Image (cartoon, rainbow, N blue to C red):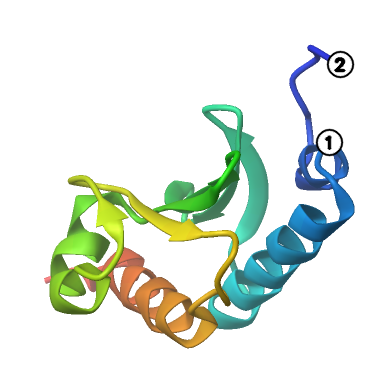
């Protein structure tokens, strides 16, 4: 087993079985499309998209689910829609044996992008 921490999202994804890699690539592409100016990184050992030098959203694969971390504000704004999934204050678990809710992920990421927009000087 490779115990090295991945330095890139490509390395992270490569460490999973092919079926999970497919899901991770779908989520990655969804986030990229919703936040085209965001930069990819690894933070907290997870794939992360950063915007304006701040974390926008993280995601990670586990045995039975994909965890999405849009910090508490993103999850709070979509509380009703996320209520059908197991979740915590800043996380939600999407089961790997079900289709990923890519449209919901898109809206959540776009919400986070809007939050991160620089505020005009007054």
Secondary structure at numbered mark 1:
loop
Vertical arrangement, residue 48 with respect to residue 74, above or below: above
Task: Name the residue at 22% across, 45% down.
Answer: 88
Residue behind mark 2: 2
Q: Residue at x 25, y 70 (%)?
A: 84
Q: Residues within 10 Å of mark 1 (few under 14, many from 20)?
A: few
Residue in the picture at 88% in, 54% down:
18
View extreme (bottom): residue: 103
| Location of residue 7 (image quadrant) | top right
Q: Identify the residue position indicated by label 1 in the image.
A: 15
Q: Residue placed at 19% from the left, 59% from the top? A: 73
80 on left or right of 31: left
Depth order, front residue of 44/94: 94
Dots 1, 2 in contact, CB < 8 A: yes
Front position in the image: 109 or 87:
87
- Please rate how many residues cluster around mark 2, counting C-alpha atoms within 10 Å: few if below 14, some from 14 to 19, many from 20: few
Horizontal and vertical percent position of residue 111: 32, 77
Left or right: residue 24 versus residue 64 is right
Q: Is residue 31 above or below residue 73?
A: below
Q: Is residue 4 above or below residue 31?
A: above
């Amino acid at each position: 087993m490779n115990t090295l921490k991945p330095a890139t999202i490509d390395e992270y994804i490569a460490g999973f079985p092919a079926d999970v890699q497919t899901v991770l690539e779908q989520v990655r592409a969804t986030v990229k499309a919703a936040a085209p100016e965001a930069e990819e990184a690894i933070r907290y050992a997870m794939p992360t998209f950063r915007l304006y030098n701040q974390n926008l959203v993280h995601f990670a694969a586990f045995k039975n689910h994909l965890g999405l971390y849009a910090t508490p504000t993103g999850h709070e704004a979509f509380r009703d829609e996320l209520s059908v999934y197991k979740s915590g204050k800043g996380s939600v678990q999407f089961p790997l044996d079900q289709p990923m809710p890519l449209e919901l992920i898109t809206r959540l990421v776009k919400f986070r992008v809007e939050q991160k927009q620089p505020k005009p000087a007054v």
